[in-house]
Image (tube, rainbow, N blue to C red):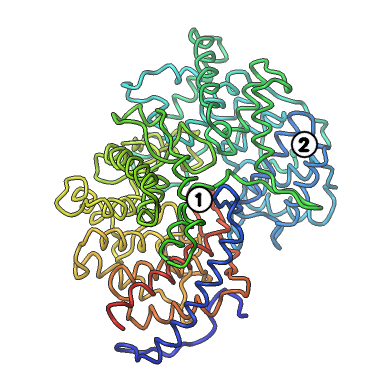
């Protein structure tokens, strides 16, 4: 079986419609691939009907877990040492660590990895530690790390809290109508901000023995470190002015804090505490994601909660649930992805038509039971009845647009095989979801992930914003997927929301015909989704917008028939649509081309042959690349099921599309 990667074979280009023998052979290959993949999913379905695969990030997760354990005095624990061994296994040849395989050295990831290894007893004079130290210093040393890393330094006594950005808890008291309040920042940043505000106010620190410190990574004294800034694209006089404004505010807040001028501090901390505890309910920890859970532990300990308290114990238990342990190592997931994995699997199997009714209906029941019916943070700017779905097992306060529309499509596409009672539940849940989705549309015509009109760009310049994720504006990929979903509910061209979304997509198309991919790597993801969304609402395929997007995809097919794009394209525009070929990105490109009506195009046939030829004997596809995006330039993801359900969906969609040809 051939391995996936950069294409090294030349495929002969065919022109014109294929002959029936060509289709006969290819269809046979596709049908075998579909059957094997269907068996693969059937064998791995949980007894309650759902699927959930590993969600892999970089070693920042293991490092930060060790740093938390060190702050709790548990750096010598077996779990910490096993996590350190995993970190060691991911070290690059140059001595550093990256955000994804094949990526450039990332200074914050590398410094935290070095610190975690040192805390767990790794000899600083070992060759791998000396190489790490050398390359870290070459890339700016600990001086160049981001704000989150500075907070870990302060927790463990390496720098004073003064060298961390101010995170004032008083901001929790600002009303929703205030120009700046916690609901103007993204949901994921908000759930970090609130516990971190308590930490900044209380300034807890453990003094380490000097042998465990990392001052050898400091090029200058911390007071002389460069100011923090976002890695985003904002530049120019306005961006410079905002950065300077917020740095002045940062300095003023710190000065007031030192002088004890904080009349609302007690009230603010109590409000922050209540806000956190309220959002523990019906949730796998605050926000159900790794960073807020970490900072919740620290914040609660600052407030006097014991390690054995129900609240802290629950946080630690949620962190433990993210651990994947084998004999020698431990790795952590940033969160779990059961709703997302299950919804896309349902769509792939429903399109297949050969999956058993029992498999599908168990899946439908599980998804229906996951609908959220309580108000969440989104309610701050949206007047709609609660509805929708979240990403994880439990995260009721944070349903998101992308999961909601993916579940809606999965339920709609399996409705006909369901009993009357299931159909009634599907119809009711989807009707609620449609109304919620329409209410979540942004003023620019697009959709973001968790909130409405969460687009105050000046917030991207606060010192705390260097994680490049302070706001949640409209994105082409989510907006187009919303259109794909609405098309299944008889909403199309002529509906006000749809027309505004089409106009948004027209404005955001790149000069070369592609679209940016916010939640998947990168322009292949965005371009596929926009073409599919536009096609499903019956924008003519001859529309120049679609035609240019299709041509971009065709131009970036590689010689072996597949597609691939590196996450480095977020930093290097010249790498758009280029990189090792992957099953997931090949499937995305094919889905876009099929929806555009190119099912008979030679490029599509070659892509289908690539997927059929590169399937493993067990029905899976091999893919080690990170094709998921957490935060561009900051955090990337490897969804272990992406190279399974997306290829299956592409193969089955292509076979369905052949009815008009054969």
Q: Label 2: how many residues lie within 10 Å, few (<14), some (14-19) or many (20+)? A: some
Of 154 and 646, the residue lying toward us: 646
Could you tell me which residue is drawn at 43 percent across and 29 percent down?
246
Which quadrant, please, contains the N terminus?
bottom right
Residue with the mark numbered 1: 362
The C terminus sits in image quarter: bottom left
Q: Secondary structure at mark 1?
A: helix
Q: Position of residue 308 (x, y in %)?
A: 73, 22
**Residue 269 tag number:** none
Q: Determine whether, in the image, residue 284 is placed left or right of residue 361.
A: right
Q: Tell me if residue 626 comes above or below residue 390 in the rendering.
A: below
Residue 655 shown left or right of residue 74 in the figure? left
Residue 510: image location, x then y, percent? 30, 60
Residue at (53, 42) in percent of width and height: 392
Q: Secondary structure at mark 2?
A: loop
Q: Earlier in the sequence, mark 1 or mark 2?
A: 2
Residue 604: name its quadrant: bottom left
Residue 608 in the figure: left or right of residue 424: right
Tell me the residue at 63%/48% (across/down). 109
What label does residue 213 carry, if any? 2
Q: Nearer the viewer, residue 261 or 33?
A: 33
Residue 268 placement (x, y as % from top left): 50, 14
Give the Cα separation between the discs numbered 1 and 2.
53 Å
Q: Position of residue 476 (x, y in %)?
A: 33, 53
């Amino acid at each position: 079986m051939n391995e996936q990667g950069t294409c090294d074979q030349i495929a002969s280009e065919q022109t014109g419609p294929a002959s029936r023998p060509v289709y006969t052979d290819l269809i046979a290959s596709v049908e075998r691939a579909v059957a094997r993949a269907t068996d693969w999913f059937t064998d791995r379905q949980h007894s309650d009907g759902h699927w959930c695969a590993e969600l892999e990030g970089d070693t920042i997760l293991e490092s930060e877990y060790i740093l938390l354990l060190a702050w709790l005095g548990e750096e010598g624990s077996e779990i910490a040492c096993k996590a350190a061994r995993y970190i060691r296994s991911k070290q690059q040849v140059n001595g550093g660590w990256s955000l994804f395989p094949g990526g450039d050295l990332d200074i914050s990831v590398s410094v935290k990895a070095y610190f975690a290894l040192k805390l767990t007893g790794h000899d600083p004079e070992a060759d791998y530690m000396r190489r790490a130290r050398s390359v870290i210093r070459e890339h700016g040393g600990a001086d160049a790390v981001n704000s989150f890393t500075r907070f870990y330094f302060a927790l463990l006594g390496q720098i004073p809290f003064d060298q961390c950005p101010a995170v004032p808890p008083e901001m929790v008291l600002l009303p929703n109508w205030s120009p700046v309040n916690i609901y103007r920042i993204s949901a994921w940043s908000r759930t970090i901000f609130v516990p971190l505000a308590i930490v900044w106010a209380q300034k807890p620190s453990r003094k380490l023995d000097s042998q465990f410190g990392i001052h050898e990574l400091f090029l200058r004294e911390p007071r002389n470190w460069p100011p923090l800034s976002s890695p985003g694209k904002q530049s120019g006089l306005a961006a410079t002015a905002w950065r300077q404004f917020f740095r002045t505010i940062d300095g003023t807040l710190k000065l007031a804090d030192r002088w004890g001028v904080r009349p609302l501090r007690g009230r603010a901390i109590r409000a922050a505490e209540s806000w956190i505890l309220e959002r523990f309910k019906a949730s796998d920890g605050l926000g159900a994601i790794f960073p807020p859970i970490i900072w919740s532990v620290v914040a609660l300990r600052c407030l006097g909660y014991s390690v054995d308290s129900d609240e802290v114990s629950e946080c630690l238990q949620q962190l433990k649930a993210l651990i994947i342990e084998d004999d020698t190592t431990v790795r952590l997931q940033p969160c779990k992805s059961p709703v997302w994995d299950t919804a896309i699997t349902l769509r792939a199997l429903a399109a297949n038509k050969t999956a058993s009714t029992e498999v599908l209906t168990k899946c439908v029941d599980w998804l229906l039971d996951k609908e959220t019916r309580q108000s969440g943070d989104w309610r701050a700017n949206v007047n709609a009845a609660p509805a929708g779905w979240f990403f994880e097992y439990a995260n009721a306060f944070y349903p998101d647009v992308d999961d909601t529309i993916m579940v809606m499509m999965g339920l709609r596409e399996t409705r006909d095989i369901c009993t009357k009672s299931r159909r009634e539940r599907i119809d009711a849940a989807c009707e609620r979801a449609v109304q919620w989705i329409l209410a979540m549309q942004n003023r620019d015509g697009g959709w973001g992930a968790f909130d409405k009109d969460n687009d105050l760009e000046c917030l991207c310049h606060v010192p705390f914003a260097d994680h490049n994720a302070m706001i949640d504006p409209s994105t082409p990929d989510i907006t187009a997927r919303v259109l794909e979903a609405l098309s299944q509910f008889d909403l199309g061209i002529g509906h006000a929301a749809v027309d505004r979304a089409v106009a948004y997509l027209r404005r955001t198309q790149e000069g070369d015909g592609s679209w940016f991919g916010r939640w998947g790597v990168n322009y292949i993801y965005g371009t596929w989704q926009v073409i599919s969304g536009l096609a499903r609402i019956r924008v003519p395929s001859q529309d120049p917008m679609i035609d240019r997007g299709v041509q971009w995809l065709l131009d970036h097919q590689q010689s072996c028939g597949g597609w691939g794009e590196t996450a480095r394209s977020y930093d290097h525009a010249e790498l758009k649509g280029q990189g090792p070929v992957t099953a997931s990105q090949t499937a995305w490109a094919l889905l876009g081309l099929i929806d555009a009506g190119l099912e008979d195009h030679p490029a599509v046939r070659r892509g289908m042959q690539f997927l059929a030829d590169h399937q493993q004997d067990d029905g899976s596809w091999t893919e080690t690349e990170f094709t998921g995006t957490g935060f561009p330039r900051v955090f990337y993801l490897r969804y272990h099921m992406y190279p399974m359900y997306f290829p299956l969906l592409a193969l089955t969609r292509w076979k369905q599309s052949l009815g008009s040809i054969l």
